[in-house]
Amino acid sequence: MTVRTCARVWSPVLLLAFVATAAATPVDEERWEETLRLVRETFPDVPQMSTERLTTLLKEGEDVVLLDARSEEEFETSHLQGAARAENFRSARDVLKARGEKPIVVVYCSVGYRSSRLARQLRSRGIENVFNLEGSLFKWANEGRPVHRGLQQVRSVHPFDEDWGELLDEAVRSE
């Protein structure tokens, strides 16, 4: 059964579990590509932003709002500098309302599934210029880009769970 067929038959959560358990244990390009493909196919209406593009926007001082769609425990382990935690539409809307401008909105989670879901909700309710960070925090950290706990830069990322944590380089995976 192909991933596309599975997507029509199974719920997205079960599909994620299938892909996660079917993939090889070590971090490898094939598993990452399958994960990214799954996110793109499940959320074709959500524009993806590369980690390289986000880095450029931040360095250029663009007006970017970073929304972290992960749990409080994940966020407290580490996050992108300046990110606001927003697990759902209501909390994301509140963060954006407080801004009062029309910034570039970049949503991230661990690998991009939860953040794509939130980005879709924001876009469907008329919020413009919303992107999912492709590969999300795991890809960002695996590339050696900085993560923070509050104001302090750290080298530790919450693995979400044992299986998805395998997409994190061991050097940054928190225990």
Image (cartoon, rainbow, N blue to C red):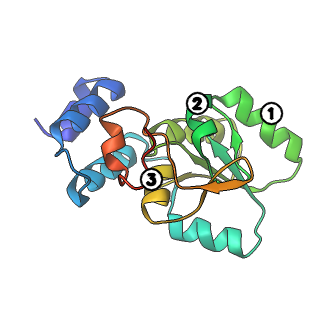
The amino acid type found where label 1 is placed reads: Asp
Q: Secondary structure at mark 3?
A: loop
Answer with left or right where residue 6 lies relative to residue 14.
left
Label 1 sits on residue: 94
Answer with left or right where residue 20 lies relative to residue 91.
left
Instruction: Name the residue located 61 percent from the left edge and 38 percent from the top edge.
Output: 75
Q: Give the CA separation, mark 2 to mark 3.
A: 16 Å
Label 2 sits on residue: 73
The residue nearer to you, when weighing 118 against 169, is 169
The residue nearer to you, when weighing 138 against 86, is 138
Instruction: Name the residue located 71 percent from the left edge and 36 percent from the top edge.
Output: 92
- Of tags 2 and 1, which is closer to the observer? 2
Q: Quadrant of the N terminus?
A: top left
Q: Dot 2 surroundings within 10 Å: few (below 14), some, or many (20 or more)? A: few
Q: Dot 3 surroundings within 10 Å: few (below 14), some, or many (20 or more)? A: some
Q: Is residue 69 visible?
A: no
For marks 2 and 3, the one nearer the N-term is: 2
Instruction: Name the residue located 42 percent from the left edge and 39 percent from the top edge.
Output: 159
The amino acid type found where label 3 is placed reads: Val
- Of tags 3 and 1, which is closer to the observer? 3
Q: Are marks 3 and 1 in contact (CB under 8 Å)?
A: no
Residue 170 appears at what percent x and percent y?
35, 52
Label 3 sits on residue: 172
Answer with left or right where residue 160 lies relative to residue 100.
left
Q: Dot 1 surroundings within 10 Å: few (below 14), some, or many (20 or more)? A: few
- Does 58 sit above or below residue 2? below
Q: Give the CA separation, mark 2 to mark 1.
A: 20 Å
Q: Are marks 2 and 1 in contact (CB under 8 Å)?
A: no
Q: Quadrant of the C terminus?
A: top left
The amino acid type found where label 2 is placed reads: Glu
